Amino acid sequence: MSPLNIALGVVGLTVLTLGLLTRPVNRSLVSAPLVAFIVGALLGPHALGWLDPSAWGDSHKLLEEATRLTLGISLMGIALRLPANYPLRHWRPLAVLLLIVMPAMCAISALLAGWLMGLPLLVALLVGAAVCPTDPVVASSIVTGGLAKEALPERFRHMLSTESGINDGLAYPLVFLPVLLLTLPSGEAWGEWIVKTWLWEVGGSVVCGALLGMLAGRILVWAEDRNFIDQPSFLSITVALTLLTLGVGKLIGTDSVLAVFAAGVCFDQCVGGRQRAEDDNVQEAVNQFFTLPVFILFGLMSPWGEWGKLGWAGIWLVVAILLLRRLPVILALRPWLQPWRDWPVAFLAGWFGPIGVSAIFYSMTIASQTGNEQAWRIGSLVVFGSLIVHGVTAAPLARWYKRHAS
């Protein structure tokens, strides 16, 4: 049997089945990403052996690029889901989340990795940086859908979406500081980090994405005013803009993931993207069709043997990171996070900081840049734990908050 045809059949059947069962899955103890991961694990080389990504070439590069594409598609959907000018109107709590909470999550995760796994400082920082961003893909599965809209307040859902959209790109400098310190002399590494990483790769990505988003939005309005579009499809336009931004951002050497979010926000301001996205069910299509395949691939490539070698220390590290990486920080900073100021919402926001596709992407990037596989081994295990724990608790906690609010 051809691996390509098996893969196509598996992806199609999984997306079709979960698409037909969206409502019961969203209200159950298993999330759609977790189901997709289980499908991949069952078909992978450690179970049935029907699909083996190592036989397809450079499987690590394949996973890195697949996660980059998935992040781009998901971030565009998030940007179009937000109310107009939302990041600008809520810049104060976002500044706290990005400038205090995210570095704190990186530091706490690194300290836990160094303590429990006995890692050197820079390697522990690699692990901490890889798992610190709030994953936009898994977060979207938590804050979208019927149950989330019924039970969870908009101020929780919009702020979590915005945080995950921005901090996913801003984790880039946190990842590359230890990478540069491991691969370059110390003095040269700091200069490279400040000038190239921050000014060009981060700042340039925001400018590049904003320009592409505004240009695409104005061209769309111009074409609509002249009746040049026969059968408009907002989903196809936004996917095309995502691919364009990912490609251009990578070609000019910027953080292409952050560029996509900037493009989506600016595109939305030009065309009123939120209403169009709701009319075309863009976010639902993104969640079902574009994000589930990467979890199947992650299931196929999960290093079960390497996880086993980590032993109990690996399990305790996953538990410690899920409990201590985010929740205490959010609760401590609750007075400065206006949308999450009351205790129940602060608890939800502290608990639901899922670790997913972004951690896989950065783990693969670290491995390709440094040759160090520790971030991939440990980071992928933490992602596996987050998929289980956050997937199992999403629906019960949403129901709990609904009862509490009423």
Image: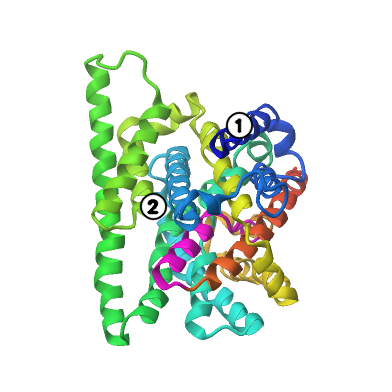
Left or right of 28 on screen, residue 360? left
Q: Quadrant of the C terminus?
A: top right
- Residue 314 appears in the picture as rendered: no
Q: Amino acid at mark 1?
A: Gly
- In this image, 218 relative to 298: left or right? left
Residue 103, x across and y down, in percent: 48, 72
Residue 125 position within the rendered picture, expressed as x and y whole percent measured from the top left: 49, 77
Residue at 69% x, 73% y is: 309
Q: Earlier in the sequence, mark 1 or mark 2?
A: 1
* Element at label 2: helix
Residue pictured at 26% horizontal, 58% vertical? 253
Q: Main secondary structure of the magenta part?
A: helix
Residue 322 position, x and y percent, is 66, 66
Looking at this view, is 168 or 150 the one in front? 168
Residue occupied by mark 2: 257
Determine which residue is flagged by label 1: 9
Classify residue 243 by image quadrant: top left
Horizontally, residue 368 falls left or right of residue 206, namely right
For the residue pair 406 and 351, the one nearer the viewer reads as 351
Nearer to us in this view, 363 or 91: 363
Q: Tag 2: residue type?
A: Val
Q: Is residue 50 above or below residue 110?
A: above
User: Per the image, is 353 magenta?
Assistant: yes
Q: Which residues are magenta?
A: 349-371
